[in-house]
Amino acid sequence: MAKFTFVFDDETARTLRTTAERLGKSQSLVVREAVAEYAAHAGRLTDAERRRMLGAIDALMRRPASRSREAVAAEIRAVRTARRHGGRKHSAE
C-alpha cells in the first residue's frame, strides 16, 4: 500500500471521522472505499452529456441518406472481405 497525506477542511474531516465511527471502519478504509466509488462513476456520462449525444444522433438520423442501401451494403461486404484476408491491400482514401 502507498501512504498519502491529505489536508481536509474541518467539515470534511468531521464527516470522515463520524462516518468511520458510525460504520466501524478506519478512516483510511472509508477514504479508499469513497475513492473506489468515485472512480466507478467518474467515467460515466452525466445526464446532460447523454441528452446532448442522443440529440446529435437523433439529428443525424433525421437527415436523408447520402448513399443508397446498395452502396452501403457493397462497402460493408468489401470491408468484411478485407478483414478476412488480412486487411486493406491499398491505402485508405
Image (cartoon, helix red, strand yellow):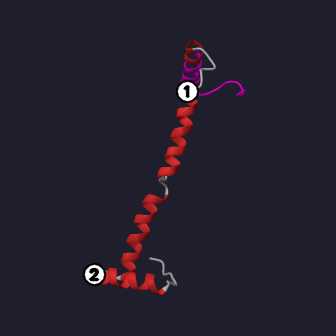
Residue 60 horizontal/vertical position (percent):
58, 31
Q: Residue 42: horizontal and vertical position, in percent?
A: 48, 59
- Secondary structure beneath label 1: helix
Q: Against 18, is 32 above or below?
A: above
Q: CA distance from mark 1 to mark 2?
A: 54 Å
Q: Amino acid at mark 1?
A: Arg
Mark 2 secondary-structure assignment = helix
Q: For the C terminus, which image quadrant? A: top right
**Tag in front: 1 or 2:** 1
Left or right of 4 on screen, residue 67: right
**In the rendered structure, which amino acid carries the disc numbered 2?**
Arg
> Label 2 belongs to which residue?
22
| Residue 62 numbered mark, or none | 1
Which residue does the image show at 41% across and 66% down from the upper left?
Answer: 36
Q: Judge by depth and name the residue closer to the eye, 74 or 37.
A: 37
Q: Choose top left, top right, bottom left or bottom right for residue 1.
A: bottom left
Q: Which residues are magenta?
A: 74-93
Instruction: Tell which circle, 1 or 2, labels the residue nearer the N-terminal end.
Output: 2
Q: Quick check: is 62 in the magenta stretch?
A: no
Residue 82 among those drawn in magenta: yes
